[in-house]
Every structure is written in C-alpha cells, then in structure tokens.
Amino acid sequence: MGEERKEFAAEGSAQGTEALALRPARRDERWLIFRRILRERLDPTKLEWQRFVMAEAGDGAILGFAQMKDWGEGVREFGSLVVEPEARGQGIGGKLIAHFVAEFPRPIYLFCGGHNVAYYLRFGFRRLKRESDVPGPLLKKWRTAQFFSRLVKANVALMVIE
C-alpha cells in the first residue's frame, strides 16, 4: 500500500509483541480513531484521519495514536494522543510525541488537562498562562477552554514547545 513504516523496539512490549511501528493512519481506521477519542473524552474537533500517526504492535493491534492539527498561519497543535489502557507506561505516548516534534517545525502547541502538565514538561513543553501568549488561530479555542474550565471546575492547560 506504500505506507511509510518506522520500526523500533518497544520497551516492555504490550500484548506479547516485540516491535512497534509508527505509520500513517488508514481511511478504514477513521471510526476507530473517533470512538477512542470519545472514550477518552478528548476534543473531538478537527479529527482528520489523514493527519494521524498510529502506533501499531507487531501483531497488528493499534496501541495508540496522535495527530498534528493545522490551524493556519504556521500554528500547529499536537493533539488526540491516545494510548490504550493496557499499553500505558511503556513509552508509546512518548514515542508519538517525539515523532511529531521531530517531523514538524516549531512552535508546536497542545491543550491538555492540568493533571497532564508534568508529563508534557518532560518533553520540553512549557505552560502558557496569559492570553497574550496565545497565537491568533488558537484564541477561540483557548477562550472556549477557559470558559468550560470555570464552568465545570476543570483545569485545562495550553502548552508550547519552541
């Protein structure tokens, strides 16, 4: 099918697999992506399956995925990071983050729950706290996130790696 595959050994492999491949998502995986995004209660907007990279085990199981959203004006948002519950803690999310950070020019932004800020700090992201630091294309999303954060008493963070 002409898919690009990037193979590497998985640390503490899941489901008895020894290798993990990062590859572009396929059209037939778009509903799998959508269902898992909803299951994890992530932002279901701007889900374009063509922007996703899948983390696939040697046995073909999809253990995780993520995407890079293009907001225009050179603004990119890393998002939709999902790792299957049974595969967490094995470095799959980190490998997906490293892939996108290496493949796309900076700055790269991301929205996350406040409980995930420490995780992203490990990869070089820093938290933005002032609206004046938010690029124009993300302002509407930032303001919406701030509104709902207050409404439901949740903590939503905007982060950037430059």
Image (cartoon, rainbow, N blue to C red):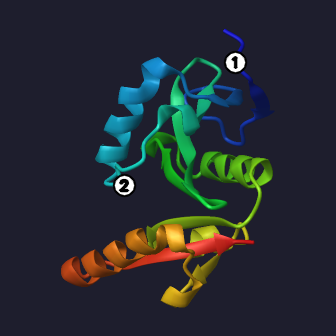
Find disc 1 in the rendering and name its residue: 3
30 left or right of 160?
A: left
Residue 2 higher or lower than 123, as above or below = above
Foreground pick, 160 / 84:
160
Residue 82 higher or lower than 53, as above or below = below
Residue at 39% of width from left, 71% of height from top? 140
Find disc 2 in the rendering and name its residue: 42
Q: Residue furthest left?
A: 151
Residue at 57% of width from left, 83% of height from top? 128
103 left or right of 85?
A: right
Is disc 2 surrounded by few (<14), some (14 to 19) or many (20+) residues within 10 Å?
some
Foreground pick, 92 / 89:
92
- Residue 72: where, in percent of width, then height? 58, 57
Please tell me in which quadrant of the rendered image residue 155 appears.
Answer: bottom left
Instruction: Give the secondary structure at mark 1.
Output: loop
The N terminus sits in image quarter: top right
- Residue 149: where, in percent of width, then height? 30, 79
The C terminus sits in image quarter: bottom right
For marks 1 and 2 on the same chain, the one whose residue lies earlier in the sequence = 1
Residue 108 higher or lower than 156, as above or below = above
Foreground pick, 69 / 90:
69
The kind of residue tagged 2 is Leu
Residue 108 higher or lower than 152, as above or below = above
